[in-house]
Amino acid sequence: MVGLGDYGKSAFGFEDLDVYQGACGFRRQVYDLAHSLPGREKYALAQQMTRAAISLTNNMAEGYGRYNWQETTQFFRHSRGSLMEIIDDLNLCLEQGYMTDDAWQDLRRAAESLVRQINGYIRYLQSKKSG
């Protein structure tokens, strides 16, 4: 199965996935926002956001390393769940006035693109289950 053991430029393979690279870019954006939050949010919202952003990419890496389409699919579903968690955090940031509407919309667009990539990779994995 292509993508679950065929290594590209990286010795680890998952780093070559477009979906992983997109998630890393999104993670950086979330980190930037989390670091800009008020100090009172340092141990609450900021920490929650960064944990979810880490989980987003960690689950992709772990799932890829399983070399089994079922387990890989499950871990990518966990990544998608972490992304949804971040969306909820972004909504809270907007409600609390921690970000502008424009910044919120930019991150939402990035998240929408990323969820399409994750769903596409999951569909790809599902299509390979019979092969």
Image (cartoon, helix red, strand yellow):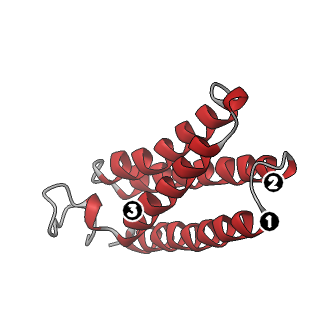
Report which residue position mark 2 lands on: 94
Report which residue position mark 1 lands on: 101
Q: Nearer the viewer, residue 105 or 102?
A: 102
- How far apart marks 3 and 2 lie (CA) works out to 26 Å
What kind of residue is marked 1?
Answer: Asp
- Total marks shown come to 3
Q: Nearer the viewer, residue 111 or 67?
A: 111
Mark 3 or 2 closer to N-term? 3
Instruction: Evaluate if marks 3 and 2 touch, with contact meaning CB atoms under 8 Å apart.
Output: no
Is 103 placed above or below 99 here? Answer: below
Report which residue position mark 3 lands on: 20
Query: Mark 1, mark 3: which one is toward the viewer?
Result: 1
Give the residue at x 72% y 27%: 40
Q: Position of residue 106 (x, y in %)?
A: 66, 70
What kind of residue is marked 3?
Answer: Tyr
Instruction: Evaluate if marks 1 and 3 touch, with contact meaning CB atoms under 8 Å apart.
Output: no
What kind of residue is marked 2?
Answer: Leu
Instruction: Evaluate if marks 1 and 2 touch, with contact meaning CB atoms under 8 Å apart.
Output: yes
Give the residue at x 49% y 54%: 27
Mark 1 or 2 closer to N-term? 2
Label 3's element?
helix
Label 2's element?
helix
Q: Position of residue 70 (x, y in %)?
A: 42, 54
